[in-house]
Image (tube, rainbow, N blue to C red):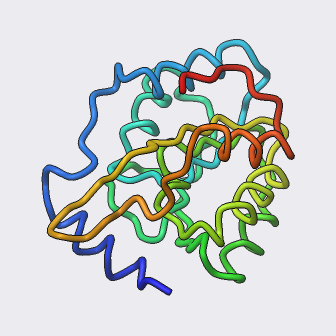
């Protein structure tokens, strides 16, 4: 099994990795979803550099956000949980969370295929709503493939539909 903590410590040392503008569609979609649903608390899985957290807090400073990632790679002043979605302890910790919304933007493809279904189930257990996006393409940095699961959109859809109603599919 990959040592995700070591891989992403190295990856996030690259200042250009995971740098995205706040107006990207996935972030705008999250903000729009929050504006139309009774959301007071969020777990942002795979917070990365904290772009989504900053974007949501600029729009809704009253909302409670918890950053969830294998390590804290950002400087946002929100609670953080170190969590590895490929470990039994990480899945148990995620299942124990209770929030109104889980955001998981371009994260699940970083897991081995054998861990994806369990992670999706844990997300569903943590919140009544989830915004999940998948970057379904290769992502190689310094010779390391970061997107370990690259499957057709129907494969992802079938896993997600076990727990969620899909409101938007931009495949």
Give the vertical position of 90 relative to 137 (above or below).
below
Residue toward you, 83 or 110? 110
The x and y percentages for residue 17 are 21, 52
Give the vertical position of 4 relative to 17 (above or below).
below
Residue at image x 57%, y 72%?
83
Residue at image x 66%, y 75%?
90
Give the vertical position of 39 relative to 152 (above or below).
above
Residue toward you, 59 or 135? 135
The x and y percentages for residue 57 are 48, 31
Residue at image x 38%, y 53%?
48
Residue toward you, 145 or 22? 145
Q: Is residue 132 left or right of residue 163?
A: left
How many numbered tags mark residues here? 0
Quarter of the image for residue 35 reads top right
The x and y percentages for residue 67 are 52, 54
Quarter of the image for residue 163 reads top right
The x and y percentages for residue 58 are 43, 24
Residue at image x 63%, y 49%?
43
Quarter of the image for residue 171 reads top right
Residue toward you, 55 or 153? 153
């Amino acid at each position: 099994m990959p040592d995700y903590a070591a891989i992403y410590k190295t990856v996030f040392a690259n200042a250009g990795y995971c740098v995205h503008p706040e107006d990207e569609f996935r972030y705008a979609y999250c903000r729009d979803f929050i504006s139309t649903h009774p959301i007071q608390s969020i777990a942002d899985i795979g917070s990365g550099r904290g772009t989504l957290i900053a974007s949501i807090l600029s729009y809704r400073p009253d909302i409670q956000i918890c950053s969830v990632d294998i390590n804290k790679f950002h400087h946002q002043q929100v609670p953080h949980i170190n969590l590895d979605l490929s470990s039994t302890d990480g899945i148990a910790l995620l299942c124990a969370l209770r929030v109104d919304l889980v955001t998981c933007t371009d994260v699940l493809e970083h897991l081995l295929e054998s861990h994806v279904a369990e992670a999706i189930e844990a997300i569903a257990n943590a919140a009544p709503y989830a915004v999940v996006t998948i970057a379904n393409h290769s992502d190689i940095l310094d010779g390391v493939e970061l997107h370990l699961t690259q499957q057709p959109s129907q494969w992802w859809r079938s896993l997600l539909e076990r727990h969620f109603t899909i409101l938007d599919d931009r495949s």
